[in-house]
Image (spheres, rainbow, N blue to C red):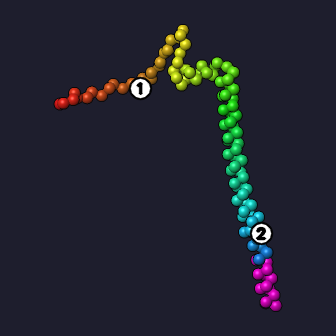
Amino acid sequence: MRLILIFLTALLILIQYPLWFGKGGWLRVSDLSHQLDSALAKEQQLNARNAQLASEVQDLKEGTGAVEERARNELGLIKDSEIFVQVVEPGALKAPAKTAPAGQ
C-alpha cells in the first residue's frame, strides 16, 4: 500500500512539472504576460510621440506660423518692423569680478 502511495505521488509530481516549468507552463505564461504589458505601454508612448511629430510636420508643411514661431524661439529672429525688448530679472546680472592685472 505504501509503495502505491509513493508511486502515485511521484506520478502526480511528474504530471505537474510541465504545467509549472514546461514550455507553456504557468511561470512562462506569467512572464510573457508581463513582457506583453510593458511592450504595449511602450507602444502607446511611441504612438503618442509619433502623433505629436506628425502634427508638427503638418504644421511646418502647411502654415508659416509654426516656422515663424521656431525662428523666434530657437534662433532669436525678429521681423523688420519689430523691436526686440529683453526683460532682465533683478539680481540676474552680477557685477564682474575684478581681477589683478597680469604680471603682479
> How busy is the neighbourhood of tag 2: few (under 14 within 10 Å), some, or many (20 plus)?
some
Q: Is residue 30 above or below residue 17?
A: above
* Nearer to me, 89 or 22: 22
| 78 lies left or right of 51 | left
The answer to whether 92 is drawn above or below residue 84 in the figure is below
Q: Position of residue 91 (x, y in %)?
A: 40, 25
Which region of the structure is painted magenta? 1-13
Percent of width and height locating residue 6 = 77, 85
Dot 2 amino acid type = Leu
- As drawn, the label of residue 92 is 1
Q: Which residue is mark 2?
A: 19
Label 1 Cα neighbours within 10 Å, binned few <14 / some 14-19 / many ≥20: few
Check if residue 4 falls in the magenta segment. Answer: yes
Q: How many numbered circles does the render carry?
A: 2
Q: Amino acid at mark 1?
A: Ala
- Main SS, magenta region, reads helix
Q: CA distance from mark 2 to mark 1?
A: 68 Å
Residue 5 within the magenta-colored segment of the rendering: yes
Q: In which quarter of the view is residue 27 placed? A: bottom right
